[in-house]
């Protein structure tokens, strides 16, 4: 599987999943996620997937400053309705990393590890996402200001040609390179930029 090289330079997210530990899926329940995992889930790499990954990372760091974030222990609310724009894509990435799900999630074992009803849409919040710890009720609201990181102007003319199937091989390669370069810039150069990934407590 030949992903772009910069995927390896993107931040990694390490969590502790009590369910995984209970069932012996991984030693001590410690799981490391990479941006590649998010891409495999989404089926593509774009600023939305990257920003969802980084927003989740930022919220987890804010909520668990001195410990591994607890997968399955975080409630997540999205400002957008589930059918609005890219809300579904964002929710899928967030669910991967946090374990939070709506009513289709894991129902638990003997009252433990229930992942249902931890993910919801249409919240009245002053940001894109609100993450709340189940144990302490501490919350963090995060947003991605992608407009502060514009893509190359050439993308606007190349994308329609690629969509229509009229682009040359060279134009297609250029479009793909420019598209992924914006993702690279976000993940590698601005992962910790508070002007791009904004956290409110």
Image (cartoon, rainbow, N blue to C red):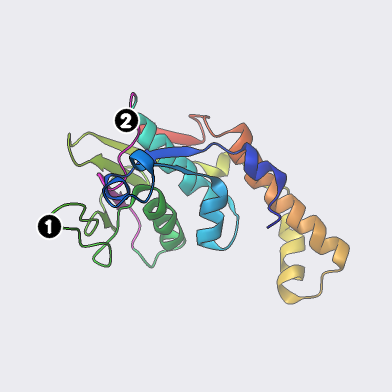
| Residue 76 belongs to the span the image colors magenta | yes
Q: Residue at x 71, y 55 (%)?
A: 2
Judge left or right: residue 49 versus residue 91. right
Q: Residue at x 53, y 45 (%)?
A: 34
Q: Is residue 143 visible?
A: no
Q: Nearer the viewer, residue 191 or 14?
A: 14
Classify mark 1: helix, strand or loop.
loop
Q: Main secondary structure of the magenta part?
A: loop
The residue at which mark 1 appears reads as 110
Residue neighbourhood size for the residue with mark 1, other residues' Cα within 10 Å, grouped as few (<14), some (14–19), many (≥20): few
x, y (%) of residue 132?
25, 41
Q: Quadrant of the N terminus?
A: bottom right
Tell which residue pokes out farthest to the top in this image. Answer: 66
x, y (%) of residue 121?
29, 58
Q: Residue at x 30, y 45 (%)?
A: 21
Question: Is 201 located above or below residue 71 in the figure?
Answer: above
Q: Which residues are magenta?
A: 66-81
Q: Are marks 2 and 1 in contact (CB under 8 Å)?
A: no
The nearer-to-camera label among 2 and 1 is 1
| Residue 26 belongs to the span the image colors magenta | no
Q: Residue at x 56, y 44 (%)?
A: 147
The residue at which mark 2 appears reads as 64
x, y (%) of residue 108?
20, 58
Residue neighbourhood size for the residue with mark 2, other residues' Cα within 10 Å, grouped as few (<14), some (14–19), many (≥20): some
Judge left or right: residue 30 versus residue 169. left
x, y (%) of residue 102?
27, 62
Say which quarter of the image contains residue 170: bottom right
């Amino acid at each position: 599987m030949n992903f772009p090289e910069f995927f390896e330079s993107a931040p990694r997210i390490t969590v502790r999943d009590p369910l995984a530990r209970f069932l012996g899926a991984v030693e001590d329940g410690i799981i490391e996620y990479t941006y590649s995992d998010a891409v495999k889930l989404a089926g593509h790499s774009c600023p939305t997937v990257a920003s969802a990954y980084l927003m989740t990372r930022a919220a987890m760091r804010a909520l668990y400053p001195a410990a591994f974030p607890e997968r399955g222990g975080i409630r997540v609310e999205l400002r957008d309705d589930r059918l609005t724009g890219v809300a579904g894509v964002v929710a899928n990435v967030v669910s991967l990393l946090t374990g939070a799900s709506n009513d289709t999630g894991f129902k638990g074992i003997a009252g433990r590890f229930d992942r249902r009803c931890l993910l919801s849409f249409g919240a009245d919040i002053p940001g894109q996402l609100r993450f709340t710890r189940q144990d302490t009720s501490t919350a963090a609201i995060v947003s991605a200001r992608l407009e502060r990181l514009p893509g190359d102007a050439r993308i606007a003319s190349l994308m329609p040609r690629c969509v229509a199937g009229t682009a040359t091989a060279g134009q297609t390669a250029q479009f793909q390179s420019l598209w992924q370069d914006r993702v690279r810039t976000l993940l590698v150069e601005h992962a910790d930029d508070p002007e791009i990934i904004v956290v409110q407590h």
